[in-house]
Image (cartoon, helix red, strand yellow):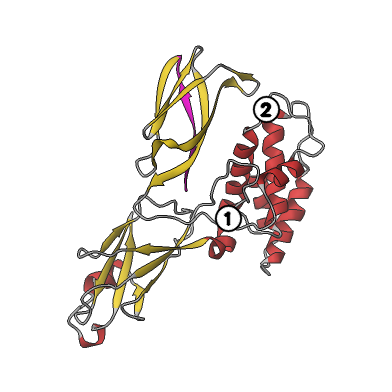
Amino acid sequence: MVQVSDVVNIVAGDNTITFPNETVFADTNYVLIAKAYKSQNFGIGLDVVKSQGGFVATVDDGPAVLEYFASGIGAQTIPQTTIPLSRDWTYAKLWREIERDLTLTGMLKFEKFTIINRAILTVVSRFYALMQRAYLTPQTIAVGETDVIFLDSLRIMRTGEPIAFHIESTGTRTIYPVSEQEFSAFDVTDFHNKSRIVWNYMGEKIRFARGAGLSTCGNCTLYLPRVPYYGAADDTKVDVADGATIPLVMLVGKRIAIERYGKGLAPVEPERFEEAVRALYQSFNFKVKTETIADDVKVLA
């Protein structure tokens, strides 16, 4: 499953929208949801024709904003699993909790998916240092004769923290990451390195070096910290672990819904965010200062 979404500026007439290179969809195997609007409360007519790797959006009035979400089977260098983390919460169930007691004006039915997806990404991005082990996803990788693999096709979560990759190989149990200097200095002929594999992550690629006793790097499995999957169906489970994270996603979703479509509604009280953030840290048995929680609330609320 491959999923992409974006918000782009468009003009009156035909607008050609092209998906990223790593997510090229065929005409018949992806679902596309799109909305054009001049402002939050002023949607405009939109005609969409799907095409290979994108679509053409036609509007009569411009300039405007186009928001789209596409989901389907695409071509990727390394296939990704699409098993969400939650076992209990679907998009429909979560949305019922988010919109409870809210009167939302001018909102189209599909926009609940955009709101929930953004709420999930906001929460997970903020607390990824706590959650990244849950998002480590195994990918089988083929390390060729050049001993280099490229990662530009993968939806890797990139935060201010170092990316925590983990790699295993069937060729040897001695495989570990090294710095650029250590990688350059690795002596493949050294007796102690005979059955070792070292690797170094740099930019959008991982480089491998193997001792002279190994003809190949074997079958390798890369565990990568992925971005949460986006959903576009009521019965799809959300890609958030059940537990203390769910109430925080609800609050952020409620805040986004009110900002967009809750004209005249009171914002979510900061105290509710503080309580949910504190509960999240406690669920990980992680002690933080009051100032840290206050900073989190500023970002989320």
In the rendering, at what x and y percent does residue 163 appear? 44, 61
Point 58% across, 55% down: residue:
84
Q: Which mark is residue 118?
A: none
Residue lying furthest top? 60
Q: Quadrant of the C terminus?
A: top right
Residue neighbourhood size for the residue with mark 1, other residues' Cα within 10 Å, grouped as few (<14), some (14–19), many (≥20):
some
* In this view, 218 is above or below 45: below
User: Which region shows up in magenta?
Assistant: 1-12
Q: Nearer the viewer, residue 110 or 207?
A: 110
Residue 11 part of the magenta-drawn span: yes
Q: Nearer the viewer, residue 275 or 242?
A: 242
Q: Which residue is mark 1?
A: 84
In the rendering, at what x and y percent does residue 272 appear? 78, 49
**Sequence order check, earlier mark of 1 and 2:** 1
In the rendering, at what x and y percent does residue 95 appear? 71, 42
User: Can the viewer see residue 301?
Assistant: no
Left or right of 280: which side holds 73? left
Left or right of 147: which side holds 131? right
Residue 19 part of the magenta-drawn span: no
